[in-house]
Image: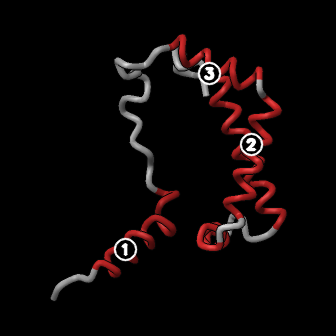
């Protein structure tokens, strides 16, 4: 019996939503930066972010509002259950902001940096 593409997609989708948070991320070589990585450009990007902090967050907020206005994307966010109420959505996006701030504050040369 041949497996239909839709069935494969359903299985993949089901695995991501039901088991995804329980599957550990492979982190074997996270401490090794690629050869093309330029620490000076990275730090320049961090400085750019902080020099334009307000504009960066307003643009991220506009992007979020635009994403929420696309029904297909909004439906996916609602299905996860993590953005299904205003309070849950607020918490989720505040957590996302916190993670993004870690990116801009991080030092990739230190293993204990976020």
Please tell me whether mark 1 sits on a helix, a strand or a loop: helix
Tag 1 or tag 3, which sits nearer the N-term? 1
Q: Quadrant of the N terminus?
A: bottom left
Residue underneath mark 1: 9
Q: Is residue 66 shown left or right of residue 25?
A: right
Q: Nearer the viewer, mark 2 or mark 3?
A: 2
Q: Is residue 16 shown left or right of residue 49?
A: left
Q: Nearer the viewer, mark 1 or mark 2?
A: 2
Residue underneath mark 3: 45
Instruction: Locate residue 110: give its quadrant.
Output: top right
Which disc, if any, is residue 113? none
Tag 2 or tag 1, which sits nearer the N-term? 1
- In-front residue for pair 12/76: 76
Q: Is residue 89 above or below residue 98?
A: below
Mark 3–mark 1 Cα distance, whole angstroms, equals 37 Å
Q: Nearer the viewer, mark 3 or mark 1?
A: 3
Please tell me whether mark 2 sits on a helix, a strand or a loop: helix
Residue underneath mark 2: 59
- In-front residue for pair 28/66: 66
- Return the x and y of residue 69 as percentages of the image width and height: 71, 66
- In-front residue for pair 4/65: 65
- Return the x and y of residue 54 as percentages of the image width and height: 82, 32
- Return the x and y of residue 112 as percentages of the image width and height: 57, 22
- In-front residue for pair 58/79: 58
Q: Is residue 48 above or below residue 59?
A: above
Q: Is residue 30 shown left or right of residue 53?
A: left
Tag 3 or tag 2, which sits nearer the N-term? 3
Q: Is residue 21 above or below residue 40?
A: below
Query: Residue placed at 76% from the left, 50% from the top?
Result: 62
């Amino acid at each position: 019996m041949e497996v239909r593409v839709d069935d494969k997609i359903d299985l993949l989708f089901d695995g991501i939503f039901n088991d995804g948070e329980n599957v550990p991320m492979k982190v074997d070589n996270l401490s090794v930066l690629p050869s093309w990585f330029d620490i000076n450009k990275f730090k320049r990007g961090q400085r750019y972010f902080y020099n334009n902090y307000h504009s960066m967050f307003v643009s991220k907020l506009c992007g979020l509002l635009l994403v929420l206005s696309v029904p297909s994307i909004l439906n996916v966010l609602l299905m996860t259950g993590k953005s299904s109420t205003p309070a849950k959505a607020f918490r989720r996006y505040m957590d996302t902001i916190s993670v993004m701030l870690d990116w801009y504050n991080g030092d990739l040369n230190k293993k204990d940096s976020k």
